Image (cartoon, rainbow, N blue to C red):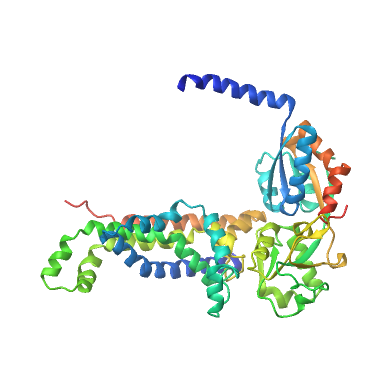
């Protein structure tokens, strides 16, 4: 067994270097709300181009801190437009590569069918114990949820009931497991092919919060990487746009 | 400097760690005693279950606790039928989670201490007509003192250092479930590095002092 090791290593080197020539890998940091559509898009992209996509999903604020500290991500799909702009102005992203890939929508959602009425009046009733939101300090969907509560003059009333997820995925998980009766999630998390995947929800009217413009950007490690460039182009293609729309995003 | 929110998180952490340690000393002592004395064939199983939190990722514990204590889980059904509501996002919920999480850190030092006493001192006590309870309290407990000190300090410090489980079942509620480790994570995510440093440095100092106390208090000349 031992004597095979050098050959194995040589083979591995060839395999890896061969990979770079033909199809490359692209490391992508994706905002938690866009995980599901991105997985679908990445699968199509891999099929069409042969490149491989490595997805990491999480809170936009956390990615910012990691990118500032040398994370190897090549493409960043943020949940807002400020973070990519900031990265670009600070020299951590490729200038001019920034564009809006989706406009996110907020949904008041419960895992129980019929719990949330179509007007969202449930928010004003004192029936629930926990309302889940994403961390407003770091997640744009959390900040948007706070805006909605402020606009509806409900912030003081629901403040003691707020439970904060580290990102929008955790907020969704709190509601999905029933630990919070309802919560503000991304429409994309509970919608597929234009339909609610379960439970009940109130799509929050757009006038109650600033539009959640989600920008993508090529980061410095992705500069001159054909796979990174190809992915960003693919995101603006009609195939990807159709997938993005099917999850309830505007574009 | 530390803000009021930071101080509240520190205070909550200390409250959580003291409550958890107090419960664990009560629950852990009989378990450790049984494990040290028993010849039962279940000893291996119980020992393994107690040690599980040592090797399990906190995410596994957090995930199962979230499901089990949630409204559709068995524990959640029980607490609801008792009129207690559900445990996630509450301080009692964190206490329950911490008791599981820190159990081995209390049981194992106690078990070792009890085992190292051996049967001899208790047999002698019995020949002097001490009842088993009397023998336990006046012979075993004093002899196991270093074990109790180790168990209390480790149980407390390990609970202070808890993060993953709290993140998964806490919901980050100020004064209820936002402990210091989560507050540090929040500061880092929000790029408030100065505040993160104050808390993180404090945690580092605390952990060092806890371990220093442990090694100083239990530093005895080796037994002949």
Q: Residue B193, how many percent across, how many down?
A: 62, 54
Q: In this rendering, does residue B179 appear at all?
A: no
Q: Residue A124, how many percent across, how many down?
A: 76, 78
Which sits in the foreground, A144 or A42?
A: A42
Q: In this rendering, does residue A185 appear at all?
A: yes
Q: Residue A36, how many percent across, how many down?
A: 74, 51
Q: Within the image, what quadrant is residue A139 found in?
A: bottom right
Left or right of A137 in this view: B217? left
Q: Within the image, what quadrant is residue B174 found in?
A: bottom right
| Residue that lies at the very extreme toward the front in this rendered image | B41
- Against A225, residue B151 (above or below) is below
- Against A86, residue A109 (above or below) is below
Residue drawn at 40 percent across, 67 percent down: B24
Residue drawn at 41 percent across, 61 percent down: B103
Total numbered circles: 0
Left or right of B219 in this view: B46? right
Which sits in the foreground, B8 or A218?
A: A218
Residue drawn at 73 percent across, 29 percent down: A23
Which sits in the foreground, A222 or A110?
A: A110
Left or right of A236 in this view: B196? left
Q: Residue B186, how many percent across, how many down?
A: 63, 58
């Amino acid at each position: 067994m031992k004597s095979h090791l050098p050959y194995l290593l040589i083979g591995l080197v060839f395999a890896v270097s061969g990979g770079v020539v033909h199809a490359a890998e692209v490391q992508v940091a994706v905002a938690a709300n866009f995980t599901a559509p991105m997985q679908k898009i990445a699968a199509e992209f891999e099929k069409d181009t042969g490149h491989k996509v490595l997805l990491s999903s999480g809170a936009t604020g956390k990615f910012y801190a990691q990118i500032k500290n040398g994370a190897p991500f090549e493409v960043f799909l943020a949940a807002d437009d400020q973070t990519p702009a900031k990265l670009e102005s600070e020299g951590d992203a490729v200038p001019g590569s920034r564009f809006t890939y989706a406009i996110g929508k907020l949904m008041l959602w419960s895992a129980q069918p019929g719990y949330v009425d179509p007007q969202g009046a449930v928010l004003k009733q004192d029936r629930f114990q926990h309302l889940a939101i994403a961390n407003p300090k770091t997640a744009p969907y959390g900040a948007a949820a706070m805006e909605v509560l402020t606009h509806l003059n409900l912030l003081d009333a629901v403040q003691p009931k707020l439970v904060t997820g580290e990102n929008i995925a955790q907020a969704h998980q709190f509601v999905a497991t029933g630990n919070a009766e309802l919560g503000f999630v991304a429409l994309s998390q509970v919608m597929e092919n234009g339909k609610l995947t379960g439970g009940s929800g109130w799509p929050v009217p757009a006038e109650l919060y600033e539009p959640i413009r989600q920008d993508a950007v090529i980061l410095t490690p992705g500069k001159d990487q054909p796979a990174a460039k190809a992915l960003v182009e693919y995101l603006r293609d009609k195939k990807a746009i159709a997938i993005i729309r099917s999850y309830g995003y505007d574009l | 400097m530390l803000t009021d929110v930071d101080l509240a998180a520190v205070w909550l952490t200390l409250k959580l760690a003291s409550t958890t340690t107090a419960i664990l000393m009560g629950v852990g002592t009989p378990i450790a005693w049984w494990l040290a004395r028993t010849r039962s064939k279940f000893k291996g199983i119980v020992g393994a279950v107690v040690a599980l939190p040592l090797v399990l990722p906190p995410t596994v514990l957090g995930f199962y606790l979230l499901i089990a204590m949630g409204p559709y889980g068995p524990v959640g059904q029980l607490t609801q039928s008792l009129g207690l509501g559900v445990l996630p996002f509450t301080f009692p919920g964190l206490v329950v989670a911490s008791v599981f999480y820190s159990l081995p850190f209390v049981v194992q030092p106690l078990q070792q201490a009890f085992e190292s006493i051996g049967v001899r001192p208790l047999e002698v006590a019995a020949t002097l007509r001490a009842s088993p309870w009397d023998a336990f309290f006046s012979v075993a407990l004093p002899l196991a003192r270093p074990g109790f000190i180790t168990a209390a300090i480790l149980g407390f410090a390990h609970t202070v250092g808890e993060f993953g489980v709290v993140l998964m079942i806490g919901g980050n509620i100020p004064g209820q479930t936002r402990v210091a480790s989560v507050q540090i994570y929040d500061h880092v995510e929000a790029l408030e590095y100065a505040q993160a440093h104050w808390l993180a440095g404090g945690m580092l100092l605390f952990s060092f002092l806890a371990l220093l106390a442990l090694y100083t208090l239990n530093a005895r000349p080796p037994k002949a």
